[in-house]
């Protein structure tokens, strides 16, 4: 019979990760679908979606490297959401506008970073240890995750700047997301077979 630590680390924590990740990735879907139905972005910020795409793609790469089905399936739906709404956001943004230009820059920049990671891990660091490659991919994943959180903070800042509690909002998001990021790094470090 499995002990409590094994059950928590191998089943409960990954299932919580799956649920948390997908709630996070799908939380903006109703608003975005409404914007699509109306045929305009309005004040909806599409910039988190290219970051979701890159974030999920990097975690999927990491999941393949560490043979983790939970991590793969926690991020696969988010990657699809990221691809779809990046395309929709681009299509709804005015031609030549700042939003469209930002979507282009963010998407090309993030995909370029993914290509650079792939080049480094697959070819440049080919003779490096598996631990080095795993750490490199993991650090990249967490860097993209921080960019994702920053894109959400920018959205929150834009929406709440007139409400007088911007500093509290930004501070709360920063602390929350920092704790969550460190927690997931710790979970995946503990889950690896030593």
Image (cartoon, rainbow, N blue to C red):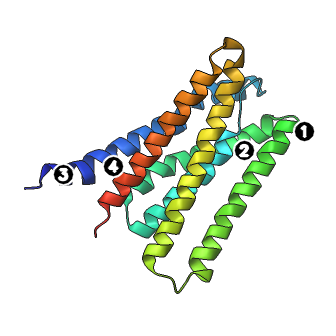
Circle 3 crowding by C-alpha within 10 Å: few under 14, some 14–19, many from 20 = few
Instruction: Residue 10 in the image: state x and y as whole percent.
Output: 26, 54
Q: Secondary structure at mark 3?
A: helix
Mark pair 4, 2: CA separation: 30 Å
Q: Nearer the viewer, mark 4 or mark 2?
A: 4
Question: Residue placed at 68% from the left, 33% from the top?
Answer: 154
Q: Secondary structure at mark 4?
A: helix
Q: Secondary structure at mark 1?
A: loop
State the quadrant of the N terminus.
bottom left
**Residue that carries the numbered disc 2 in the rendered image:** 87
Instruction: Residue 26 in the image: state x and y as whole percent.
Output: 53, 35
Q: Is residue 70 visible?
A: no
* Above or below 107: residue 128: below
Mark pair 1, 3: CA separation: 54 Å
**Residue that carries the numbered disc 1 in the rendered image:** 95
Instruction: Residue 178 in the image: state x and y as whole percent.
Output: 49, 41
Mark pair 1, 4: CA separation: 42 Å
Cβ atoms at labels 4 and 2 below 8 Å apart = no
- Judge from the rendering whether residue 23 lies leftward or rightward of residue 165; answer left or right: left
Circle 1 crowding by C-alpha within 10 Å: few under 14, some 14–19, many from 20 = few
**Residue that carries the numbered disc 3 in the rendered image:** 5
**Residue that carries the numbered disc 4 in the rendered image:** 14
The residue lying furthest to the right in this view is 96
State the quadrant of the C terminus.
bottom left
1 or 2: tag closer to the N-terminus: 2
Question: Residue placed at 33% from the left, 49% from the top?
Answer: 14
Q: Nearer the viewer, mark 3 or mark 4?
A: 3
Circle 2 crowding by C-alpha within 10 Å: few under 14, some 14–19, many from 20 = some
């Amino acid at each position: 019979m499995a002990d409590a630590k094994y059950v928590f680390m191998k089943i409960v924590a990954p299932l919580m990760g799956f649920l948390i990740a997908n709630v996070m990735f799908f939380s903006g879907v109703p608003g975005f679908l409404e914007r699509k139905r109306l045929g305009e972005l309005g004040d909806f910020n599409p910039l988190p979606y290219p970051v979701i795409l890159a974030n999920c793609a990097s975690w999927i790469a990491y999941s393949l490297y560490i043979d983790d089905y939970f991590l793969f399936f926690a991020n696969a739906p988010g990657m699809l959401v990221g691809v779809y709404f990046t395309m929709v956001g681009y299509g709804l943004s005015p031609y030549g506008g700042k939003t469209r230009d930002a979507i282009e820059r963010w998407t090309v920049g993030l995909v370029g970073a993914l290509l650079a990671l792939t080049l480094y891990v697959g070819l440049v660091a080919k003779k490096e240890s598996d631990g080095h490659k795993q750490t490199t991919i993991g650090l990249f994943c967490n860097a993209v995750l921080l960019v994702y959180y920053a894109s959400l903070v920018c959205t929150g800042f834009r929406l709440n700047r007139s409400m007088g509690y911007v500093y509290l909002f930004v501070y709360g998001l920063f602390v929350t997301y920092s704790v969550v990021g460190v927690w997931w790094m710790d979970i995946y470090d503990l889950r690896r077979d030593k």
